[in-house]
Structure formats: structure tokens, C-alpha cells
Amino acid sequence: MDNIDLKPVKEIDTWARKQFTGNRYIYYRRKGSYAECHCAECGGRYVLRAVETEDPFKDMALDIEKPERDMQTVCRKCKTKAIYKPAGYTRSEYAFCRICFGQKVDDEHFVFRVFYADQHTRQGCDTVYRCMEEHRIFLEKSRKPSRYCNYGARWHQSNVGENWRYLVFPKTYKEIAKTGMFKYVPVEQSIMNRYYDECGLIDYYIAAARYPDFEMILKAGLIEYADNLVRKIPVNPNPRGKNIEDRLRINKNRIKSLIACKGTKKVLEMYQLERRLGKHWTDEEFEIIKKLRENTWKTDLNKASTVLKYTSPIRLRNYMKKQKMWMPGEKADWRERNRRQDLRREYYDYISMRINEGYDMTNDVILFPTDFRRRRDEMILMVEKAKMDKRKTEVLEKYPKIKSKYKKLSEKYSAAAGGYIIRPAKDAAEIVEEGRTLHHCVGGDGYLRSHNDGRSFILFLRKADKKDVPLITVEIRDEEIIQWYGAYDRKTNKKLIDAWLAQYCKELQKRKKKPKTVQKTAKIGSKQQKTA
């Protein structure tokens, strides 16, 4: 960019002013038989005075014209068409627009320069016009565009696309016609109208510069495909392909049928899937894929491709019909459609888990199980157990002080009363298991680190006859309860547990005042609490 000399365009400023012809104002103030006027465009001031009419029975008029709000008129000084605005009651008026100017650099380089022009009109002042260049988009053949923004006195590279409306400077079309890489790109009005007329000009020529076969795509009739390239809708093109089938990533025998449907994205994606999997589907198999695509909520064609990699569409359809998860008939209600949709998703998840675990997917017993939902649940448990075992091993090495402090903390915090017991965690793995079982966040690194460093401690409150069944998790600091939660962060039997913990804290205060004695388990008070 630094080596390219882009001189200021003098015509832009003059042309920009012409775009604000509907925003020129004359401010007036009526005073009895005359009116004071001020043209904001030329700065001229004049007075419209009352003149007598030929009919003595009619009232006198102001220069044959009586100023009214928003009435069109002509300035008596500069003869410019303008609109009347009452002085004293009108705020400042502001209008702006963007102007696109395309400039040829050489046959393989082109630049779009976007100017920001505005008009500011205030009562008692002349209209102020400004025009500054704010964006530059450099196009190079077979490459992505380079965008720059003007921040003050320097240009900075930007990744922001063009999401604004603009007017096209007429000289732009002459510059485009002189550029070699746009020589054969269609510029008919029927084509340009597809891209919001002139407001899609930049996106249109970005696609033409980046994809050298863009003009061939349009002339071949792949209009929808070209639209997707212009509007930056992902269609997975291959700019380095040597021929059109390689650029579209489809098999050669599919080109005619793709042209027949004008390069529709849905059809193109199915053709691309066929080539990606190395298949050559028949018309019957393609119709199966098409029906599978049309009868799903959110496109899960990529999920289905994990299965189609190891089997044919016909076998997949037969298995889905047997498992009652194929698309139902037209008369089926929405509940049945949703149920079958969910079954298909569960089946795809099952296949993905099998692939991730390294199973032989050519085995029909694994690919098409009799009860895939039960197999899926077994896989989930197996995967979760492996993750949990790995997590436990990591935390035992990372937080070893939790285990070494257990004996000392047990003497301080262990207690039993009212059919409940409370004790500290034995090690970091037990805290992780507690969080997994009760589905809350106590197994996170924050709680483990706090327990390991001695800032706060994790205690387990459980029923005396079910010591190994997680019930309530408590966080304590000294003799004060910070928080407690049960399964899914709920507080079941809140009044009972709050009362039990309140009595427990009182007992801890009493222990603190007594001299240290060795005791394995102490009872809380004389009153027995009710069992939850």
C-alpha cells in the first residue's frame, strides 16, 4: 500500500455536494408585514416585504410568497431550490452519505476508495460541507482483499468488511473497464440488480478478483453459486482447482445437474459430500440423502456423513426404518417428527463416540446395533468414567495437602447428631467425586485450591445409616459456615439443615474454648434433631 500513489480526487467534493440537493434550507422570521430570510447555502440575507395588490379588498402579501414551514422555494440571491425553516424553532440539520470511487492501479490490482461526505446546517450560519476518505479496499488477482481504515492521519489495516450503503462515483465504471482482471466479468444491469444494484458493487468485484473463474461461473448459469460467493456465504470453493469440478469440489458427472438448479447451495453441499467421501451415488441414493436433508431441523448432514463413510444410503435408510427413526409420512403430527429427529441425533452421537474410541466401524454389529440407545448409554458411562479417573489422578498429584490434613481436620470438624454425621474430605479425589455425584461445582480447582491452602474446607454432611451416600456439601472457614448445597445446587429441607448446622457451629465454638483432647467423634448437644 505504501508504494501506491493515490492522489486526492477533486471531483468527489463537488459531486458530493450535489447529493444533498434535498437538504438545503432558508431560515425565515416573520415580523408583521415583512419577513427576514437567511439562505444557509449561499449565506445571503434578504427581506420579503409586503406589496399592495390590485384588489383593494384583499390583504397585502409578502412578495407574493408567504413563508411557511417545509414549503419549497427559491433563494432570491443564488436561485437555489430550498425549503423554508422557521428561525428560532429549528435545530441543526445533519445529512451524510458514502461515495465509492474505484481506481485502477494496474491490470492485476484495483482499489476501491470510500469517501464519507456530510452536510451540517445551523440557524444563522452557512452550510458546512466535509468530504474525507475513510476506507480503502485493495484487490489483487486470486487473493483476499486488503482493507485499510483512516484513523486520523494514518492508515491502519482492518479486518472489518463492508456493511454500509454507498453511492458509486460515475467515473468508477470507466476505471473498471480499463482493468485487465475485470475484462470479461459481466456488468449487465440484470446481473448487478441481484446485488442491491450499485450498493453491492464492491462485494461483486471482490469475488471477481478473488475467484478467477467467476465470469465462467456466471456464464455457465451457476447464478446461485455466484451469489453465495459475493455475499460471503460459505460454499467451500477451491480457488486452486485446475478445472470447474475441482473448484466446486464435486464429481464431473454432477456438473450438468448442478447447472440445471443454478448452483443451489443445498444441492452443492450434497454433491461435495459425495466427492469428499469418495462415493458415486446412484439417483436413488441421492434422493435418500436429499430426503434426509430436507426433513431435519438444523442441518445434520455432516453428522450423517460420519455414518455414510462406512455404509451406503440405502442400508442407512433401511436401518432407520427398522429402528423407527426414518422420516414419518406427511400425515404424522409434529410430536412424532420430533421424536424421530431426536432418535437420529442420538444415533449419530453413538457413531461419533464409537469412532473416537477407535472401534472397527466396518463391523455391522457396531455400526447397526439392535438397541443403539442402550449401547449409547453404556458408551457415555464408559467415557465419563475414563474422564473422571483421569481427573482424580490429576487432582491427587496437584493437591496433596488435602489428604495430609485429613486427620487433623477430622479431630476438629467431625461430629454426629440427630441421625447425621459430618466430616471433612479425605482427599482431593473424594471432593471431585462428590461434585460429580451431586452435580455441582465443588470439584472445581477453586474449591480444591482453597482447601489445599487452608483458606476454607469442604465438609460432607450425610445420614448416619448411609455414610457413603453423598447428601449435603458444606464449605466452612474456622467455625463459620460459608455455604452449603445439595444435589443440583438445591437446598432440600433447608430449615432442618440450617438448624442442624447452627447447632453444629455452636458446638465448634465450645470445643475451641475447651483444652485440646483426643476425640474421634463428638456428639452435638443433648437435643436430638429430626431425621430428613
Image: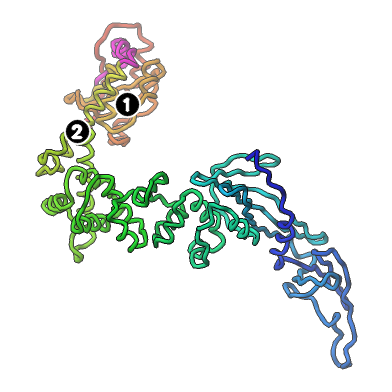
Which part of the image, by quadrant, shows the C terminus? Answer: top left
Q: Main secondary structure of the magenta part?
A: helix
Dot 2 amino acid type: Leu
The front one of 181 and 353 is 181
Neighbor class of circle 2 (other Cα within 10 Å; few <14, some 14-19, many 20+) is: few
> In which quarter of the view is residue 24 placed?
bottom right
C-alpha separation, residue under disc 2 versus residue under disc 1: 19 Å
The answer to whether residue 419 is above or below residue 243 is above
What x and y, as percent, mark residue 411?
A: 29, 11
Decide which of 471, 10 is in the foreground and name it. Answer: 10
- The relative height of residue 336 versus residue 397 in the rendered view (above or below) is below
Dot 1 crowding, Cα within 10 Å, few <14, some 14–19, many 20+: many
- When the figure is inspected, residue 233 is found, relative to residue 366, above or below; the finding is below
Q: Is residue 432 above or below residue 183?
A: above
* Range shown magenta: 397-417
Q: Position of residue 74 (x, y in %)?
A: 79, 74
The residue drawn where x is 36% and y is 18% is 451
User: x, y (%) of residue 337?
Assistant: 22, 57
Q: Which residue is mark 1?
A: 443
Does label 2 or label 1 sit earlier along the sequence?
2
Residue 16 is inside the magenta segment: no
Q: Nearer the viewer, residue 518 or 144?
A: 144
Question: Is residue 54 toward the left or the right of residue 221 in the image?
Answer: right
User: Which is closer to the viewer, label 2 or label 1?
Assistant: 2
Amino acid bearing label 1: Gly
Task: Say if residue 170 shows up in the picture.
Answer: yes
Quadrant of the rendered image containing residue 219:
bottom left
Per the image, the residue denoted by label 2 is 381
Q: Is residue 417 visible?
A: no
Label number found at residue 399? none
